[in-house]
Image (spheres, grey):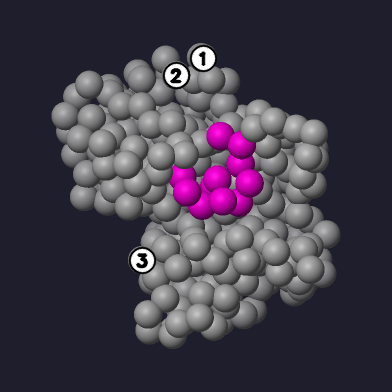
Amino acid sequence: MNITKEYAKKLLPKRDDKSNKYDFGKILVIAGSYPMAGACFLCLKSSLKAGAGLAVSVVTDKLKPIVSQMVPEAIVYSSDKKTDYMDDSVFDKIEEISKKKKFDLLLLGPGLGDDKEAVKTAVKIIRKLSLPSVIDADGINALGKTKDISFMKKIPSILTPHTGEAERFCGFKGEKAAVCMAEKTGGVVVLKDYKTIITDGKETFVLDKPNSALSKAGSGDVLCGIIAGIWAQMGKQEGFDKTTALKASICGVYIHSLAGEIALSEGSEYSVTAIDILESLGKAFKKIKG
C-alpha cells in the first residue's frame, strides 16, 4: 500500500491541551560517541520536536558538555569514565537512571560507532532494559553481530536500517530484506532508500517520494527521532505494541519526507542538511494537519 497524506494524517497521535509532559512519553536516547556527538543531538531534538514529552540521554563523560549545550531541552547524564565510546560504565548509569525515570521507550544506535565495547553494551542495553525500542544504525549492526537475538521477539521494536545495514543483517536486498528483518526480530522495519519500505513481516507500506535533499548524513538520525517521538505519544495512548509501532513508523516516515520537501522548497537539493529537515518539522506537522 502506498502511503498518502490523508492516511498519515489519520495516524497522527492526538494532543489533549489538558495534559502534561508525562502524558506524551519519556524517551531514553542512547546515541552518539565523541567523534559523532551530532547523532545524539539530532535524535534528542527531533524526538522532542515530534511531540515526545521528555527526552533523556546517558553519554560518556567527554560527550556530556557537548550534548547538554546543543539540546538544553533534554536531560543529559553521563558516566564518570572519560572514554570516546560507551562501555559498561554507561550501562551502569543507565540502569541507575532507569529505576528512577521509568522510561516508556528506548531510542538506540545512531553514532555509537563500531568499538567492541560499544557494540557489546548496545546489545546489553536492549536486552536488559527490555523497553519498546527504536533501533537504528550501529544498534542494528550490533544486533547483526550477535548470535542469539531471540530476546528481540519479546520487545516491541522498530528497526530503521538503510539498504547496506539490511543486507548485512539478512543477506538480502530490498523488500525481501525488510521482511526478513521483521521476521527475525518480531518487530517493524523501516527500510530507507530513495523509496521507503515499511513492514511488520505481513503488511507492507511504501512511500515513493524520492528527494535527493534527504540523502545527507544525519537525515536518518532525524527520522529515527521523529518515529520515536510519535511512538512515545501513540504508545502512551494506545499501548506499545506492533500495531502502534507500524502506525508510528508510517506517520514518522511521511512527516520526515514532508519536512524534507519543505526544506528543499526553501533552499536547494545541494544545500539541505539534517538540521534543515529538523527545523522544518513544525511546518510539516502544521501542513499535514491542514
SS category of the residue bearing label 2: helix
**Numbered mark located on residue 283 in the image:** none
Q: Residue at x 69, y 41 (%)?
A: 233
At label 3, which amino acid type do we have? Ala
* Residue on which disc 3 sits: 217
SS category of the residue bearing label 1: helix
* Magenta residues, start to end: 44-54
Measure how far apart labels 1 and 3 are at the Cα level: 34 Å
Question: Which of the image's four quarters has the N terminus?
Answer: bottom right
Residue 23 left/right relative to 54: right
Residue 174 left/right relative to 61: right
Question: Does the rendering let one see residue 272?
Answer: yes
Q: Is residue 59 above or below residue 66?
A: above
Quarter holding residue 251: bottom right
Confirm or deny contact between disc 2 and disc 1 (CB under 8 A): yes
Measure how far apart labels 2 and 3 are at the Cα level: 30 Å
